Amino acid sequence: MLIQDILRRKRDAEALDADAIHTFMRGVTDGSVGDAQIGAFAMAVVLNGMNREEAIALTEATRDSGQVLRWNDLKLDGPVLDKHSTGGVGDLVSLVLGPWIAACGGHVPMISGRGLGHTGGTLDKLEAIPGYNVTPDDGVFRQLVKDVGVAIIGQTGTLAPADKRLYGVRDVTATVESLPLIVASILGKKLACGLDTLVMDVKVGNGAFMPTAEASRELAEAIVAIGSGAGTPTSVLLTDMNQPLADCAGNALEVHEALRLLRGKGRDSRLYQTTHALATEMLVQVGLANDAADAATRLETALASGEALERFSRMVHGLGGPSDLAERPEHYLAPAPFATDVVAPRAGTVNAIDTRALGLGVVELGGGRRNAGDAIDHRVGLSHIAALGQRVEAGQPLLRLHAASQADAEAIRRQLDAAFTLGEEGSVAPASPIHATLRKEDLS
Ligand code: URA
């Protein structure tokens, strides 16, 4: 089958059969398809779309372009499952959720990413912990998944290599914004981890990857249909990103917050509610809990007994971090040299928060990257971020800024202040950070 013929068919808005898609993606993987052809393919998909069968075939071809993890030989005593998020600000769910699920009998091989644009990355947060190695040997990774039940590591070049190449071309050809390409990219990598179940957290709001609530919903529906169509039961929670999920953002600050939750604190927070809802969905979908009430009991036991915290500690130590991080976090997580409050210029209720601006603020402080490969300052970030609907008086803090120097802090003070819209009393914050849950049976 000629590659140019596959391109002509997609250019002319014909549906491609699975054979054509697999042939194309094999060429992407082995290098026989050139960058120009990848660009032409991506643009044709952006312009003409793909039907569900094509999108499933593209996802399967991405998944199968490299190693697909198999767990049978380890004789695990529980199911293999994972969660993935479209990314947010103050979203440290993975740090808490992975160990929590492990403490409930699941095995979580979590392959995570670095910060992208204004959103933070799980790997960057974990690298705030001295010694934590996000690229361990395969044997270490598998042993931790078996013994501890969770290992959070970085992408290994052998998983879904076609995506790395395709995404690289999309990034420079204005072809990132295509539902089938986005879904194949996200799910191709996740489904290569050999999961029994995947739960996706699709963010909705001004800090989300998708630009509108409708687009987030469309992505959620496509993920459920395509993930399940490719053979991995997949459900989605649509969750709020109209404000940072935690009241802090920044790598070391978020590790502190993860430890606080794993100690059973902060149960009234949006972060706890979101993590709990995702954990419940995972446990019920995979059969580790009979229903939401049963999941709640198991999750409570795992937290109250200290087992979830213990799993986190064992994972950290198993990947090269200190064995006593949970006992002495301040010894290992250095604070930023300079801290100052950004205060409200007048009294009012927080009516809106520009979440993206806060995420970019962390990047500008050095807590994220402007360019791939930039070094990160894990100490910097924001804490005590005022919440939507919160009343503040003139001169009271909107947030606390943690910077490498006073000059760095002053350089972005205005921008952070402007991220908050103060208005009249009575504006409403959403009652729950969970907008909706989508499962296969919900799709028409
Ligand atoms: N994240 C991914 O991994 N892939 C995309 O295409 C978009 C976001």
Image (cartoon, rainbow, N blue to C red):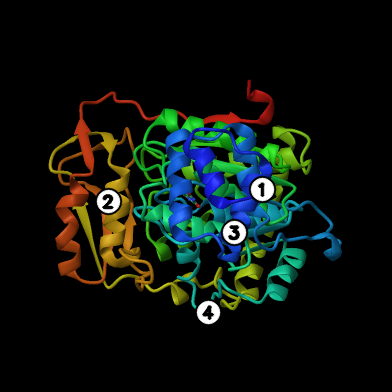
Pointers 4 and 2 in contact (CB under 8 A)?
A: no
Q: Which mark is residue 197?
A: none
The x, y position of residue 293, in whole percent, is 71, 33
Amino acid tagged 1: Glu
The x, y position of residue 189, in whole percent, is 60, 55
The x, y position of residue 89, in whole percent, is 39, 50
Label 2: which residue? 399
Compare marks 2 and 3 and give the one earlier in the sequence: 3
C-alpha span from label 4 to label 1: 36 Å
Q: Which mark is residue 131?
A: 4
* Mark 4 closeness class: few <14, some 14–19, many ≥20 residues within 10 Å: some
Label 1 vs label 3, nearer the camera: 3
Amino acid tagged 3: Gly
Label 4 vs label 1, nearer the camera: 1
C-alpha span from label 1 to label 3: 15 Å
Q: Is residue 236 above or below residue 373?
A: above
Q: Residue at x 37, y 30 (%)?
A: 429
Q: Residue at x 33, y 66 (%)?
A: 371
Q: Which mark is residue 27?
A: 3
Label 1: which residue? 60
Q: Residue at x 31, y 36 (%)?
A: 390
